Image (tube, rainbow, N blue to C red):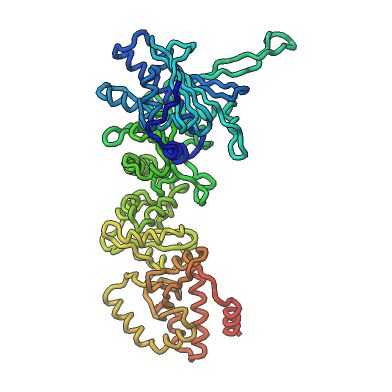
Amino acid sequence: MRTKQFKAESKKLLDLMINSIYTHKEIFLRELISNASDALDKLYYRSLSGGVSGISRDELYIRLAVDKDARTLTVSDNGIGMTAEELEQNLGTIAKSGSLAFKQDNEKQEGIDIIGQFGVGFYSAFMVADTVTVESRTQGGEAYRWQSSGAAGYTVEPCEVGFERGTVITLQLKEDTEQDKFSEYLEYYRLSSLVKKYSDYIGYPIKMWREVSRPKDPEAEQPEYETVLEDQVLNSMVPLWRKNKNEITEDEYNEFYQSRFYDWEKPVRVIHSHNEGQATYDALLYIPRKAPMDFYSKDFEKGLALYSNGVLIMERCADLLPDHFAFVRGVIDSEDVSLNISREMLQHDYQLKLIARNLEKKIKSELKKLLDTDREAYEEFFRAFGLQLKYGAYSDYGTHAEQLRELLLFVSSKEKTPVTLAEYAERMTDSQKAIYYACGESVELIDMLPQVDTVKAKGYEVLYLTDNVDEFVMKTMRTYNDKPFVNVCAGDLDLDTDEEKDALKAENEAAAPMFATMQQAIGDSVKEVRFTHKLKNHPVCLTSMGDVSLEMEKVLNAMPAGQKVHAQLALEINAEHPIAAKLKTLDDTTLATYARILYAQARLIAGMPVDNPTELSNLICDLMV
């Protein structure tokens, strides 16, 4: 018997495959089980085509076995087996895939669903084993043993085996180290959990003997116990997403979601679809009812479980979801995604990007359907995740704004209930030039703003924005149905007729010296003091003159390590309020006092802190006495 060299003659290549393609050592079991499943598939398809006779799918299985004393783990199957030549071709050449060749030879036959097509999965066994032994026998053929201790080479020789057909892979596990406890792969619970995690939906039973304690006589008052072996099936075999929708009950959908994603609430929406074409995949997605505790924190990990033909590739594949749909939970199963693929390779996988684009459209469509057909459920969903949709509309320079704007809700001054932009636009009067909004910490505080009072008095609806991101969203979207979004507290609020504008202009020009004295008393905090007609009953307000509003100033300045910004403000005085007439009668000293008091009042009305509360108190007291 002579040791042969791998045809890919480099130890470096084998090391690269083991250490770069697979992130976690535990993945080796998934790879070996997938190979065993392929061997069973090949045998079954050969039996259908008449190549092998007397094969029933029910008799096909995969078995795990351990010998703790010998430190061996065995993965066996009663599948098609391999000849000496096939052992040479499939295991003697790194990156040579017998499964891929089989699929290519039979690509015209429907139903062939071979998992391992990349040809390197088998070698992941060397991550946990010093020596790997493969004993294999085809139906009616001779048995052969392939053995290797790594890149040094391998041997192939005839052998005696106790089975008629199939393959047995025996791993001589490495000794434990401080970093790696290879002995865990000899424990039933560890192996069963890995099967459940990665291979639960393999289409054949994965069996393992387990020691259990049973009473010899269950009816005895004090029964004696004995240890017996039970043959356990570790996998469930049939994934829910592969079933027809009409075969699945609502309870089954909910049970899968709650047990898989650890949510005590039922989902608000289930999306189950099968797609064929450029990208073929099954999707089972869930829209949660409530946000997880860490959802709006940096610790939250988005992503869908990604499977290849029922075999788990990645627990959370972030590339399948855009950030604005990060709340979606579920699984994607695609035969187009290679089983043997790393996280880095996934980021550049064309099929994955195609699936992600399709999913984004599907999720948006289903949310819109929920909005149209079950408003109460959608509003519950939006209370939990609406902020995420708003961030999505604002981020990436508004790239997704057009896609998401129909899903957004804002509280309206009409009945103080959430409305869509479409509903607001439907109710607009013919004379309305813009979509009006106001910002504040709460609906109640916004409703008390003087400018809101004025706009409502004109018969116009106002959107109340209470989330920090809201105004940034409006600035990003700019318009809806060709109507601009206008902040009622901004300087471009245009509600006057031409005649009223001319009259106001004349009033402001006449009072220019008075305003100059007032502005000097206030200082750089305001850029201008002026009369306005936009206030109904209130004496004064602050209006932003530039792109940064008062609310935006609050939000930006609250950010950690953010550069401090200041809104350019105008102090506006109601030209029709008694205070306007009073100001015209004051001497410069008293006028300066009034100016500082009015400015402080305007800040309080706008929900802004007063710069110097003590000074304000003293000024008011001086006027009172």
Left/right of residue 295 with respect to residue 411 in the rendered view: right
Q: Is residue 356 visible?
A: yes
Q: Find residue 604 and report its horizontal and vertical position in percent.
A: 52, 71
492 or 354, which lies in front? 354
Quadrant for the N terminus, please: top left
At 43% from the left edge and 72% from the top edge, which residue is drawn? Answer: 567
Find the residue positioned furthest to the front.
2
> Toward which corner of the image does residue 5 lie, by quadrant?
top left
Q: Is residue 329 visible?
A: no
> Toward which corner of the image does residue 113 lie, by quadrant?
top left
Quadrant for the C terminus, please: bottom right
Find the residue positioned furthest to the right.
222
At 59% from the left edge and 21% from the top edge, which residue is drawn? Answer: 67
At 47% from the left edge and 47% from the top edge, which residue is drawn? Answer: 384
Q: Find residue 504 and report its horizontal and vertical position in percent.
A: 33, 80
- Vertical side of 184 occupied by 476: above or below: below
Q: How many marks?
A: 0
120 or 212, which lies in front? 120
513 or 324, which lies in front? 324
Q: Find residue 583 and report its horizontal and vertical position in percent.
A: 46, 85
- Vertical side of 194 occupied by 288: above or below: below
Q: Find residue 559 and report its horizontal and vertical position in percent.
A: 50, 63
- Vertical side of 462 occupied by 67: above or below: above
Left/right of residue 339 with respect to residue 220 in the rendered view: left
5 or 372, which lies in front? 5
